[in-house]
Image (spheres, grey):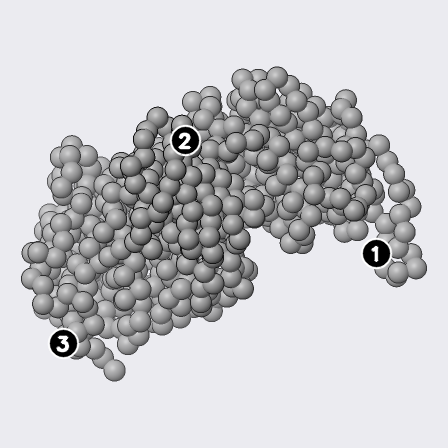
Amino acid sequence: MTMNRRSFIALTAVSVATPSNLFQPSGNSREANVPWYSVMRRCGQINFNERDPLTLDTEAWAEYWASLKVDAVLLNGGGIVAFYPTQVPYHHRSEFLGTRDLFGEMVAATKRRSARVVARMDCNLAYEDALNAHPEWFERNQDGSPRPHSESPRLLATCMFSPYFSEQMPAIYREINQHYPIDGFFTNGWPSTGPLHVCYCEACRRLYDKLGGTPPADTDASNTLYRKYYQAYMDRVLEIWRLWDGIAREKDPQSVYVGNLGGGIDTVKDIKEISQAAAWFNADHQGRAGETPIWNCAQQGRVAQSVMAGRTITNVSGAYSNTQPVWRHCSKAPAELNLWLAQTTASGMVPWFHWLGGSPEDNRWREVGRSFFDWHASNEPHFRNRGSLADLAVLYPQRTIAFYSRGRGSSRYRGGPVDHLQGLYYALLEGRFVFDFVHEGNLDAANLQKYRALLIPNAAFLSDAQCEAIRQYVKNGGSLLATFETSRYNEWGEPRADFQLADVFGAHVAGEAIGPQGNTYSRIETQHPVLRGFDGTALLPGAEAHIPVKAEVPLVLSVVPWYPAFPPEMVYPRTPQTTEHAAVFREAGKSRVAFFPSDVDRTCWRSGNADLSQLIQNAVKWVRGDDPAISISGEGIIEVFAWKTEPGYALHLLNYTNPNMTHGAIRRIYPLGRQQVRFRVQDRTIKAVRALRLDARLVFKQQGQTVSFDVPSVTDYEVIALV
Ligand SMILES: [Zn+2]
């Protein structure tokens, strides 16, 4: 069934409205010297396919995006396929373009509705005629052969070190800029935050000659050629990003280029470096598959915030089923899609709603996007954030995640690179803590001073300067929680004789890491606030891997070493009691330091063990201290974001309490009951508290700086505005 224009419009709620009165994009109405994309709050994308020029109804699509009150629409210009009559040689026109200018028509239809247009480009692939004319544009295998796309082998991979990126793409951008009133460019699939790939084209071979050899094909920070290649690769990414951004601005300084990033919490390329070139960070984090937890979109937001510091971040939400296996032309479950959009917004990103193909046969996704965006637009001032109110910082350990468990230096106990962070994160959700990510490249007094504690999930690779910043933070009264091999290696993974932060931890390395192995334990030796709630047991589960340490503090938790778990006759401790520290707790001035010389966070995530989560939560509470900035009591697994906003404050609550929290699409929502909130405001008398999803005023009390109120229920998402 192909949808004609009439039935398409019948599906949109605004079929009788005239285009001009549909909406006023916020991007046009604000201060003139502020770039339009910095005040953009919603965007949409229809991703054309080669055949779309035959059937695509531009007015109907423009009408749909207008009904979502978007500030900008992403439209395919070219790169792989040109959807306009290009004159640039080897820029492949759609085989079905005929006499049509699909891009131009769609730009015009969108502009008539006062939305911005960003030309969506693809720089990663081109056709064989280009290969014949410009063999130097293409990536090569070691034998010199080009690299065809695995599913569409007529397309061949282009190389970012080649003139395809520095000459051909610029020629295409300039042609589009000259002929169409667009507001920016976006490239699909480049540069990404994933691993580097190694190419053997002419340009790359010249680069390798300069570097002194060919880098290894896999991520391996222990290899000096890899290190040089990593820096050369990052330099080229920044060079190209800046070149294309300059071209975008040739016609209008308010225009912009944005690349494609994302990757959630698993990044190899240095996003801190990329953020130095990026005016706008687009996260292509469209959904989840497999065992990825539902909160992965909020994590993407936190990672991006850790380098963008309030500048524009968008996140693409795929309206299609982008699981594994993938279905490009069927809708995602509405509850899953809603919660993804909600996390985008809660974490301070701009939602970008995405569908592929101009003639959908599945139209269920449309209303999901429209109702969310309509609600979002009605409450827009409350999504204009002015800063996070979190009082805890989680260090985002970029290089540890990038390099630690990849490459030939990997040891057995080095698990998945993100498992440590994921374990801490889950405990933070269970404990309903309010926290930010701080990128390891931003560890300075200015960025850390607002936080009561810094939490470090196994940042094994840290530079001397980063360690010094952490030391100064603690010296100045900040508290610290750290795990396992934090500071054991320099930024490239070269081992140090001791933790660089041994003085801060109050613990020194006394042997090589042991594990991973199950059936190890911790023994409660003395009472301590971190051990509250463990009445009735002398033993707690131990982490899978630990480092023997020497510490000059009283023994609180000791290590009970591994003993056999099978067969039952053999299951008894061989060494029931040791004096080895499983955790080190110390206080110095106003600072509290909790150090677990073990992968307690990773073990917590891998096992799902409730005691380990409780232990981490207790330790976080202890280092943070009493009277948090925001506390929320009630049932359920929720994620919390709290922002200072243009009109006041906003508290975002995401309800993850669901059997599909860590597997499968969320298909229905299990609403939570009453949540009691205490929220500290900064020198302001609150006049009203409103739940924006319930669309209800809440009764509240203010005593000094503390505002107390009850949220009667949380369905999937609630935003409480305090003004
Ligand atoms: Zn190359």
Residue 584 coordinates in the image, percent (x, y): 71, 30
Nearer the camera: disc 2 or disc 3: 2
Q: Mark 1 and 3 residues: CB-CB less than 8 Å, in contact? A: no
* Residue 6 badge: 3
Nearer to the camera, 9 or 468:
9
In the rendered structure, which amino acid carries the disc numbered 1?
Answer: Ala
Residue 196 coordinates in the image, percent (x, y): 47, 46
Name the residue: 17% across, 58% down. 66
Residue 19 coordinates in the image, percent (x, y): 9, 60
Q: Quick check: can you spot residue 587?
A: yes
Q: Quadrant of residue 453?
A: top right
Q: Earlier in the sequence, mark 2 or mark 1?
A: 1
Q: Is residue 590 left or right of residue 164?
A: right
Whether 624 is drawn above or below 3: the answer is above
In the rendered structure, which amino acid carries the disc numbered 3?
Answer: Arg
Q: Mark 2 and 3 residues: CB-CB less than 8 Å, in contact? A: no
Nearer the camera: disc 2 or disc 1: 2
